[in-house]
Image: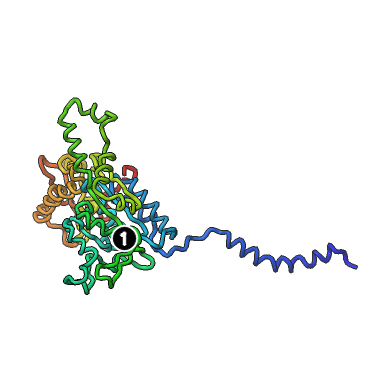
């Protein structure tokens, strides 16, 4: 009669053969797998894109990045828009540009979003442009409005994007007409026969509210000379956040503000962001020139010249864009007419400061490199 230990030894391989697939299945189930999301965008890629193109707004970008991760994980309320944000700040700090770059990252086109310019809706009766004409009025049966239904809806894997630009310039009645959109994600047109769905949309609003008040306070303090430091260090002097907060709550109804997920204040741009802005404008110029096999490069004197004459803090990045055209693009056009690019080779124009303007020199072919090498480095640590 065999020992029990021998019987167990003989049957062990068969038992292991039965248990091994189950163990493998359990091991496979415990391994971390990529999240299955209905959304195709990558929040990390979007964050990187924004940080490389928007100067001085790391906090705002980080806030948007966190919310995009929530949306990617599909942890949102299905009965309202995916996200509602109000961006407040001075002109030219990147409020609208963030939305454009977001549309480019998600849809591949920086114009693939529904933009409503609220400064064109300054009268109360313009609310019909949002909700459609009421019954009995011209256009009521068509159910037309300013909204682009396709851009609002997006797709199953890519959310729609809506921008209400300069919302403080719209009539209060027009702003109130948006409350149902922000709350329930739906807008039934006044005709009653059509409804727009915003539940798959990212909604952004921009505003300059309070910026003029703060700028005026700074100018008044500057005129007081030696008292300026004392006034701005006094605990009784409101800071920029307080001034803008008070202006915001004085202009909009509490019910309207209560339907916004995030109110983000953009920082004003300063001279410390100039090198980044100049690098971005040069990269954009080289991108346009690439189809002509032309590139430009700026030496240190040229950058210093643009930094000195190209920036107005009151107008932010837009002042750099305008002055860049005057200080760089116009002299470049003159140089290209006087010394045309090489017909069958990449051409590089080198800019240097010459008195009160920039001078461009066409480099010899041996000294000119491929246009791809002339993209300025985009600093990552100075945002």
Q: Which residue is at a point 38% across and 66% down the rendered structure image?
A: 157
- Classify residue 299 by image quadrant: top left
* Residue 53 screen position, x and y as percent: 28, 51
| Residue located farthest toward the right when viewing the structure as drawn | 1
Please state, as top left, top right, bottom left or bottom right, where the C terminus lies in the image. Answer: top left
* Residue 71 screen position, x and y as percent: 40, 58
Under tag 1, what secondary structure? helix
Pick whichever, 290 or 15, lies toward us: 15
Pick whichever, 298 or 213, lies toward us: 213
Asked whether residue 367 is in view, the answer is no
* Residue 179 screen position, x and y as percent: 30, 58
* Residue 345 screen position, x and y as percent: 20, 59
**Crowding near the residue tagged with mark 1, few <14, some 14–19, many ≥20 C-alpha atoms within 10 Å:** some
Q: How many marks?
A: 1
94 vs 259, left or right, is left
Q: Which residue is mark 1?
A: 180
Vertical arrangement, residue 373 with respect to residue 268, above or below: below
Q: Which residue is at a point 18% across and 61% down the rendered structure image?
A: 126
Pick whichever, 347 or 27, lies toward us: 27
- Classify residue 294 by image quadrant: bottom left
Q: How is the image coloured?
A: rainbow
Vertical arrangement, residue 96 with respect to residue 352, above or below: below
Asked whether residue 123 is in view, the answer is yes
Please state, as top left, top right, bottom left or bottom right, where the N terminus lies in the image. Answer: bottom right
Pick whichever, 330 or 192, lies toward us: 192
| Residue located farthest toward the top when viewing the structure as drawn | 226
| Residue located farthest toward the bottom when viewing the structure as drawn | 141
């Amino acid at each position: 009669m065999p020992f029990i230990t021998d019987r167990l030894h003989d049957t062990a391989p068969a038992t292991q053969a039965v248990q091994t697939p189950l163990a493998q299945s359990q091991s496979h189930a415990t391994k971390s797998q990529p999240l299955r999301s209905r959304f195709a965008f990558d929040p990390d890629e979007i964050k990187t894109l924004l940080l490389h193109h928007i100067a001085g707004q790391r906090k705002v970008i980080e806030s948007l990045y966190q919310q995009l991760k929530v949306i990617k994980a599909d942890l949102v309320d299905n009965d309202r828009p995916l996200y509602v944000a109000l961006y407040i700040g001075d002109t030219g700090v990147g409020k609208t540009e963030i939305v454009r770059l977001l549309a480019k990252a998600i849809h591949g086109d920086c114009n693939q979003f529904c933009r409503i310019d609220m400064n064109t809706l300054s009268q109360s009766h313009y609310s019909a442009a949002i909700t459609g004409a009421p019954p009995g009025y011209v256009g009521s049966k068509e159910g037309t409005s300013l909204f682009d239904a396709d851009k609002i809806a997006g797709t199953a894997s890519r959310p729609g994007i809506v921008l209400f630009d300069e919302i403080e310039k719209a009539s209060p009645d027009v702003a109130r007409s948006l409350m149902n959109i922000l709350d329930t994600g739906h807008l039934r047109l006044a005709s009653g026969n059509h409804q727009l769905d915003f539940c798959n949309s990212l909604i952004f609003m921009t505003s300059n509210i309070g910026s003029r008040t703060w700028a005026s306070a700074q100018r008044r303090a500057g005129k007081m000379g030696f008292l300026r430091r004392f006034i701005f260090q006094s605990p009784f002097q409101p800071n920029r956040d307080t001034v803008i907060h008070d202006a915001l709550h004085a202009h909009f109804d509490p019910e309207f503000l209560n339907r916004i997920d995030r109110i983000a204040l953009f920082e004003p741009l300063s001279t410390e962001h100039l090198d980044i802005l100049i690098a971005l404008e040069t990269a954009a110029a080289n991108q346009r020139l690439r189809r002509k096999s032309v590139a430009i490069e700026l030496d240190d004197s040229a950058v210093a010249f643009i930094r000195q004459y190209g920036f107005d803090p009151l107008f932010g990045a837009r002042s750099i864009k305008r002055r860049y055209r005057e200080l760089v693009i116009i002299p470049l056009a003159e140089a290209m007419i006087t010394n045309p690019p090489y017909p069958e080779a990449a051409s590089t124009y080198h800019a240097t400061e010459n008195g009160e303007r920039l001078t461009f020199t066409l480099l010899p072919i041996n000294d000119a490199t491929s246009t791809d090498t002339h993209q300025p480095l985009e600093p990552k640590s100075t945002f």
